[in-house]
Image (cartoon, grey):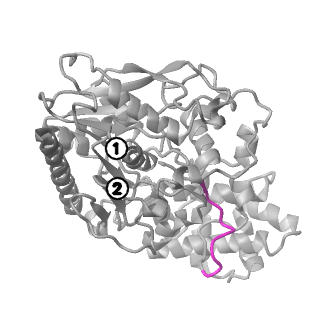
Amino acid sequence: MRPVLLLPLAACLSQALEYKAYNFSAPIDHFHNETRYEPHSNGSFNLRYWFDDSHYQPGGPVFVIAAGETDGEDRFPFLSQGIVTQLAEAYHGLGVILEHRYYGTSYPFEVVTPENLRFLSTEQSLADYAYFASNVVFPGLEDHDLTASATPWIAYGGSYAGAQVAFMRKVYPEVFWGAVSSSGVTAAIIDYWNYFEPIRNYGPADCIDTIQTITDLVDRILIDHPDNHTLHAQLQAAYGVSPPINNTDFVSILSNPLGSFQSRNWDPAVGSYGFRAYCDNLTSPYPLYRPNNGTGLLPSLVEASGYDASNRTLLAALRNNIGFINGSTPETESSGSSSRRRSTKSKRSSTATTVPKYSGTSWNYQVCTEWGYFMPGSTVPSSIRPLISRLIDMEYSSSFCSSDFGIDTPPDVQQVNKHGGFNFSYPRVAIIGGTADPWRDATPHAEGLPGRKSTREEPFILVDVDADDVWDGIRGAVHHWDQNGLSVEEVEQGVRPPAVIQSLQREIVDFVGGWLEGWEAKEDL
């Protein structure tokens, strides 16, 4: 689950000028009785935060956006024009973004090492949020007691941050009055081959069939002919890879375009067109790219795989796949549960004393220690034609844990799943998911789980959007589609969210209003 860039960088930076950054001092170590954090620390560090008081009126609630596994600035659009803006406007509330420890500038240590990353854990981050909500004084609002003892706090988060806010509400119910968990991955899973299932089930059928065929063709060459190194080299040469590299590294590169599916969004200013472009390339009946020095090998490679070498459609798809792979770079992710595939082969040694200070390092550490979400192709059931090569096994998918951090043991997923996992529920926690979200099977909305009755106290909402209502023509809501909204400019240009999203956001405003009525009733007792 590599961090996902849910919003274009330009959009984030255009909003960045609107909010001033502040720092809040928090303990590095909230749990001095837990041996996992030894040696303990009595130090403190700065958590970065931002707030918008443009809608605030005395007595209004606080809506805190959990920034999750990214630089907090990447969440500015959620504060300036997303659902939290609608909530703050409706209930005269204060909108806040709080950055996660070890992301953005909120690092406890100037130099990050595998050893001092021990303070990066789910429970430490939850304690940060509770400590912040219980003690913060917002500059310019010093005359108002906006701490959680006097003011209702509603937490909102998506993906990893969606799980965070759900857990905040359960672990610290006296601090957080409610939480909206959007695509919240409440279940930590070591072998998450399921990531690709929504892509397989909701991607354009002709495109998915082509991806499966190409994947099978490649596997037949590499797996069915394990000792034919000449054939392997010819396959890589056809893709422009020469001299040849490790076969598993090679097939991992071929899977990169799949990550763009998660970056789809109903708003074209936010979402990626990458997956639709990939599919349009693969399913074109004609070659769209000039041949390289190795594409002349394709007919013989197709024949070696057992497929029909005279199949012009397959040959065109291969040519276009090669062209697309060589002409595009993998979509990277600056944050997030949020997350897709990560590089598995690191050139760094497990004996390294420092690690890069950026979001990818922090999230990978969380993956290796608590969350899992390794994405192999080898464990896809034999009844399913996979979208990625079966050469990608668990050892390969998790190898960066050892090379980057010296971690050779499986993630302790119980640190996450003890909160409920797939069965997570708690009063005043909304669980919202998308039908086509690659992370759906790590949430209470996972395929195969029994449905739940949605109530105003515990909303349980699975969002589906027809292909005709999405600009890229692909059905299904993906990753926390409820969080973002439209800019003033987009509204003036006549852009509107799909009707389903508009309805969902109205419903969110409504049930949060019901929660706030409960706070007022409590205060009147």
Where residue 163 appears, x then y in whole percent? 43, 50
Q: On the rendered structure, is 357 left or right of 224?
A: left
Characterize the magenta stretch by its predominant secondary structure.
loop
Q: Secondary structure at mark 2?
A: loop
The magenta region covers 372-383
**Image: 353 above or below 429:** above
How far apart, in angstroms, are the residues tagged by discs 2 and 1? Answer: 10 Å
Mark 1 sits on what residue? Answer: 173
In the image, 319 versus 244, the foreground residue is 244
Name the foreground residue: 99 vs 12. 99
- The residue shown at (69%, 49%) is 344
Q: Residue furthest right?
A: 227
* Amino acid type, label 1: Pro
Q: Is residue 389 left or right of residue 182?
A: right
Residue 381 falls within the magenta-colored stretch: yes
Question: Is 383 positioned to the left or the right of 131 in the image?
Answer: right
Residue farthest toward the front in the current orientation of the protein: 525
Residue 426, numbered label: 2
Q: Nearer the viewer, residue 521 or 158?
A: 521
Res. 438 visible in picture: no
Image quadrant in which the C terminus is located: top left
Instruction: Assess whether mark 1 and mark 2 are in contact (beta carbons under 8 angstroms).
Output: yes
